[in-house]
Image (spheres, rainbow, N blue to C red):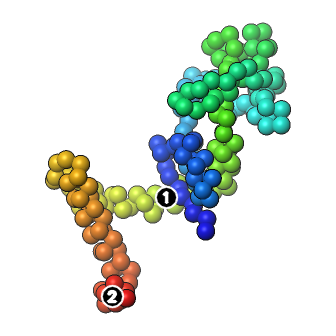
């Protein structure tokens, strides 16, 4: 059985996505756009095209950014690439503030690329996620009021939240099935 799951921005972990894919789950999580380049009027990493066969990037000026070295950052192996032509490139100002534009690529980034292609084929995925999951959180927040949790300490808060979720699920099932069919289903 293939399990598909959809998350919103802020829940992104490349390693978790890789493990999901290895286990047979199909994740749909939008890649966060963390670069300041676009806001500052420069090219973003998405403007550089990766050639898997040659293990290199093609920059917006058409130059080859080749592999230079690998490093470990936060437990992930990151490969670093840049083009030798950067110092004399007429487009350098639109690319980087330094002498070279360095591009990093996680060793398993092909997992992220596959997931992004799936998301690109599902442009309404975010709307679907909001319609199904966000309604639940909005309802629970409304029920809890401005005080949020009444209890203190994590075990008590977990219990309080569990009771809210149980109440939500029971009310939802009553709305979908009706009282008598739900009671009959619980007895079975």
Give the mark count.
2
Q: Residue at x 49, y 49 (%)?
A: 8
Q: Residue at x 63, y 53 (%)?
A: 22
| Picture quadrant of residue 94 | top right
Label 2 packing within 10 angstroms: few (<14), some (14-19), many (20+): few
Q: Is residue 69 visible?
A: yes
Query: For this view, does 48 lie left or right of residue 28?
Result: right
Q: Position of residue 27 (x, y in %)?
A: 58, 54
Query: For this view, does 59 lie left or right of residue 40?
Result: right
Name the secondary structure under disc 1.
helix
In the depicted view, which residue is nearer to us: 147 or 153? 153
Please give the residue where the numbered disc 2 appears in the rendered image. 187
In the depicted view, which residue is nearer to us: 181 or 60? 181
- Please say if 47 is above or below 27: above
Name the secondary structure under disc 2.
helix
Q: Position of residue 129 (x, y in %)?
A: 49, 58
- Please say if 73 is above or below 18: above
Q: Position of residue 135 (x, y in %)?
A: 38, 61
Mark 1 or mark 2, whichever is nearer to me: 2
Q: CA distance from mark 1 to mark 2?
A: 32 Å
Q: Which mark is residue 129?
A: 1
| Picture quadrant of residue 95 | top right
Label 1 packing within 10 angstroms: few (<14), some (14-19), many (20+): some
Mark 1 or mark 2: which comes first in sequence? Answer: 1
Q: Residue at x 57, y 22 (%)?
A: 40
């Amino acid at each position: 059985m293939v399990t598909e799951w959809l998350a919103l921005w802020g829940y992104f972990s490349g390693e978790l996505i890789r493990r999901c894919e290895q286990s047979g789950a199909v994740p749909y999580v939008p890649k966060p756009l963390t670069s300041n380049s676009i806001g500052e009027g420069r090219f973003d990493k998405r403007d550089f095209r990766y050639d898997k066969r040659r293990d290199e990037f093609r920059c917006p000026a058409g130059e080859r950014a080749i592999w230079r070295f690998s490093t470990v950052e936060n437990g992930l192996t990151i490969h670093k690439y840049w083009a030798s032509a950067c110092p004399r490139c007429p487009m350098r100002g639109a690319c980087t503030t330094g002498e070279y534009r360095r591009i990093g690529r996680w060793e398993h980034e092909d997992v992220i690329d596959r997931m992004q292609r799936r998301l690109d084929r599902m442009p309404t995925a975010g709307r679907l996620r909001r319609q199904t999951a966000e309604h639940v959180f909005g309802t629970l927040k409304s029920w809890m009021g401005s005080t949020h949790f009444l209890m203190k300490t994590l075990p008590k808060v977990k219990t309080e939240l569990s009771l809210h979720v149980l109440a939500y699920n029971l009310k939802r099932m009553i709305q979908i099935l009706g009282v008598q069919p739900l009671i009959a289903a619980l007895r079975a």
